[in-house]
C-alpha cells in the first residue's frame, strides 16, 4: 500500500503539465481583449480551484485508511 501511495505522488509530480481549463463563454469573452494577460489569469484561477476536490478526496482516503489500520491492529 505504501508503494502505491508513493507511486501516485511521483506520477502526479512527473506528469504535471499546462492545461487549458476555460469554458467556451469565458474563452470567447477573454480572447477579445488585447494581450491575453487576463485570460491567463482566469485560466490559472480555474486550475487553482480544481486542486481542492483532489485534496479533499486524498485526505478522506488517508483518514479512512488510518481508521481501517487502527481497527485492524486492535483486533490482533
Image (tube, helix red, strand yellow):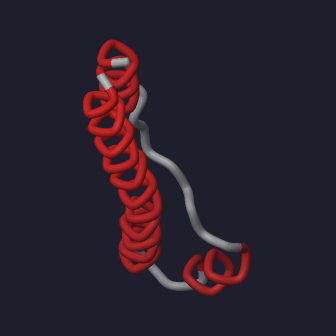
Residue 4 lies, with reference to residue 32, above or below; the image says above
Q: Which residue lies at the image location 46% right of the left edge and 63% below the top edge?
A: 53
7 displayed left or right of 57 = left
72 displayed left or right of 27 = left
Residue 1 lies, with reference to residue 24, above or below; the image says above
Q: Where, quadrant-wise, is the C terminus in this rendering?
A: top left
Residue, far right? 24
Q: How many marks?
A: 0
Tell me residue 22's x, y (percent): 60, 69
Q: Where, quadrant-wise, is the N terminus in this rendering?
A: top left
Residue, far top? 3
72 displayed left or right of 33 = left
Within the image, what quadrant is residue 55 found in?
bottom left
Closer-to-camera residue (63/69): 69
Residue 60 lies, with reference to residue 76, above or below; the image says below
Tell me residue 74's x, y (percent): 26, 34
38 displayed left or right of 29 = left
Closer-to-camera residue (25/35): 25
Closer-to-camera residue (65/51): 65
Q: Which residue lies at the image location 27% right of the left edge and 38% below the top edge?
A: 70
Q: Which residue lies at the image location 39% right of the left edge and 59% below the top edge?
A: 51
Q: Which residue lies at the image location 43% right of the left edge and 76% below the top edge?
A: 42
Tell me residue 54's x, y (percent): 44, 54
Amino acid at each position: 500500500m505504501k508503494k502505491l501511495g508513493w507511486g501516485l505522488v511521483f506520477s502526479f509530480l512527473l506528469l504535471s503539465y499546462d492545461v487549458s481549463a476555460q469554458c467556451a463563454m469565458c474563452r470567447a469573452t477573454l480572447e477579445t481583449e488585447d494581450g491575453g494577460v487576463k485570460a491567463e489569469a482566469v485560466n490559472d484561477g480555474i486550475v487553482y480551484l480544481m486542486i481542492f476536490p483532489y485534496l479533499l478526496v486524498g485526505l478522506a482516503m488517508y483518514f479512512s485508511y488510518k481508521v481501517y489500520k487502527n481497527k485492524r491492529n486492535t483486533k490482533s
